[in-house]
Amino acid sequence: MVLSQLRPALVLFLLLSVLTGLVYPLGMTALSALILPEKASGSLIHDKGWVIGSSLIGQDFTSPRYFHGRPSATMGPDPKDTTRTVPTPYNAAASLASNAGPTSRAMIERIAQATATLRVDNPDAMARGWRIPIDLVTTSASGLDPDLSPGAALFQVLRVAKARNLDEERVRHLVLTQIQQPFLGFLGEPHVNVLALNRALDRLAQ
């Protein structure tokens, strides 16, 4: 009696496990690889045969010669002490946000520190009255955001142009050409992919 009642449930459980756990994900993977092979493989970016990044994951640019992305809240194990964690910007294995609210003292102090650093690193922009864009001092929900608002990229033009001894208008024009518009004209916001912008910048300086 008990076995006759359990048998249909077990058969259904196994059937759904195979369908949803194997057939469906493998089928979708194969279909996406056929239709959108580049995106299915992680939107990887290659240069001279080497993978240099992904258009979906930001990188920690710190040199004044490059445009910088948003702050990242991701953490990772400390190489010197694996029992501790330390900040590891854009760590794709630990995607997370700071989860700090607007009244968090730690977040307020971090934003104040980031603002002070941006003022020091971009004195020409500050002298011209530029306001620091909010996305340059706040982290994204994933901690891996590869994009900036157009305003955040333009804010850095003077610093990058000066560091590379390039004409300001050339660098500004480069940023404007890298702005990606919302999908279908209304889904999302205009944005600039930082890695793509910096690669274009390197080509411009050659």
Image (cartoon, rainbow, N blue to C red):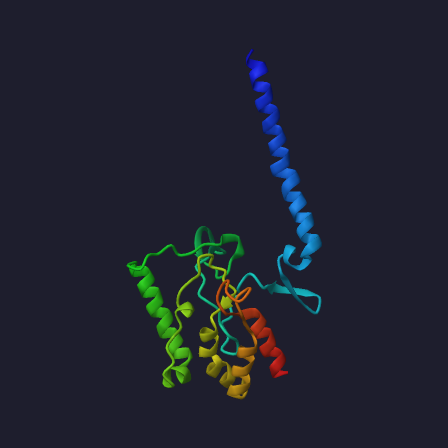
Front in this rendered view, residue 78 or 178? 178
From the top left corner, tell me how far across and down residue 180 is, in percent.
55, 70
| The quarter of the displayed image where residue 55 is located | bottom right
Front in this rendered view, residue 66 or 150? 150
Q: Quadrant of the N terminus?
A: top right
| The quarter of the displayed image where residue 73 is located | bottom left
- For image coordinates 67% across by 44% down, the residue present is 27
Would you place residue 205 above or below residue 134 in this image?
A: below
- For image coordinates 64% across by 34% down, the residue present is 18
Would you place residue 163 above or below residue 12 in this image?
A: below
Would you place residue 72 above or below residue 131 in this image?
A: above
From the top left corner, tell me how far across and down residue 21 is, in percent.
61, 38
From the top left corner, tell me how far across and down residue 96 is, in percent.
45, 54
Among all residues in the image, which is located at the extreme top? Answer: 1
From the top left corner, tell me how far across and down residue 46 is, in percent.
67, 66
- For image coordinates 60% across by 33% down, the residue present is 17
